[in-house]
Image: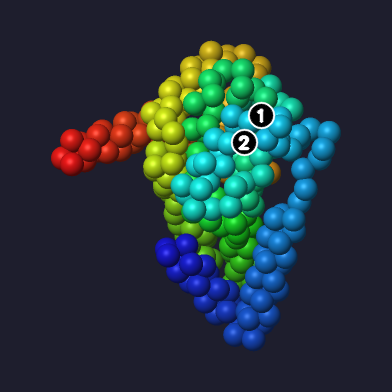
Amino acid sequence: MMLILLLLIQITILMKTLGVLNGLVVTTILLIGLILLCRFSLKMKLPKSRYSRITWEDMPWLYDGIARMANRARIQTPTIYIEDNPIPIAYSFQNSIVLSAGLFEILDRDEILAVAAHEIGHIKNGDTFLFPLLRYGKYVMGIMTLITVFIAKNSLTSLISVGVFLTYMVTLLRFLRKREFKADRIALQIAEVPYALKTALEELKFYEESMLGKDTPLPTIQPSLDRKENNYNQQTILFSTHPTYEERIAKIMSIVDMYRRLELLK
């Protein structure tokens, strides 16, 4: 993986700057800190005042639908939470899926299950464990870069270190966007109404466009527990961890069309 290669290059630069022994000590401390932060983030519990755990008795259609899709994905049925939030959002962490109350206001049942299928895709692909690692990993890379910049006597070494860090960030964003497409692909394979993911994204896009110009948070379907509400007026595609709605919808349409052609060939 390119991200691992860039991390190894940055470690090599750090060792050249501090010396092999000191570089190993600093690298070890940073990596241990990275592992501890990831373990801590994965053990975080949702506050009961804002999140409600859903059982079959609460919403049989939602619980059964997610259970069936999880079975198709060959994973354990995720724990389902409803977040007391009027903004339409969905995300996953560990083996859990969070759907906001706002989703139920603008999407129908098939669309909500399709959104849940996308989150199951993240769980299936291991993103709920990978994303925290990458999230804290970029800080490790940043600290290594700062140490090199402030200590290195050779300006060329500092420039190379900064270049490696910037390359890492760009590569990370591209990687995260690809994981979204990969989760969508899983969703299309396990959702009972695959095309509902397309209509769900269209509804969220319409909601977003209707909110532009208003002081209202915009919808997201994100895989990170500590996500922040994005302001898409200020965020460019280049620095986004998610593909645009248009990109995802176009990809979904092409995949569904491919599946239909394969069915005709049978």
The residue at 21%/40% (across/down) is 262
Asked whether residue 56 appears in the rendered view, the answer is yes
Give the residue type that dot 2 points to.
Tyr
Residue 223 coordinates in the image, percent (x, y): 58, 43
Give the residue type that dot 1 points to.
Met
Q: Identify the residue under disc 1.
A: 59
Residue 167 coordinates in the image, percent (x, y): 45, 57
Q: Identify the residue under disc 2.
A: 63
The quarter in which the C terminus is drawn is top left
Crowd class of label 2 (few under 14; some 14 to 19; many from 20; radius 10 Å) = some
The residue at 63%/81% (across/down) is 24
Q: How is the image coloured?
A: rainbow
Please tell me whether mark 1 sits on a helix, a strand or a loop.
loop
Asked whether residue 234 appears in the rendered view, the answer is no
CA separation, marks 1 and 2? 6 Å
The residue at 66%/17% (across/down) is 215
Of 239 and 42, nearer the camera is 42
Q: Is mark 1 in CB contact (under 8 Å) with mark 2?
A: yes
Q: Which label belongs to residue 87?
A: none
Q: Is residue 6 left or right of residue 101?
A: left
Of 91 and 107, nearer the camera is 107
Crowd class of label 1 (few under 14; some 14 to 19; many from 20; radius 10 Å) = few
Of 155 and 9, nearer the camera is 9
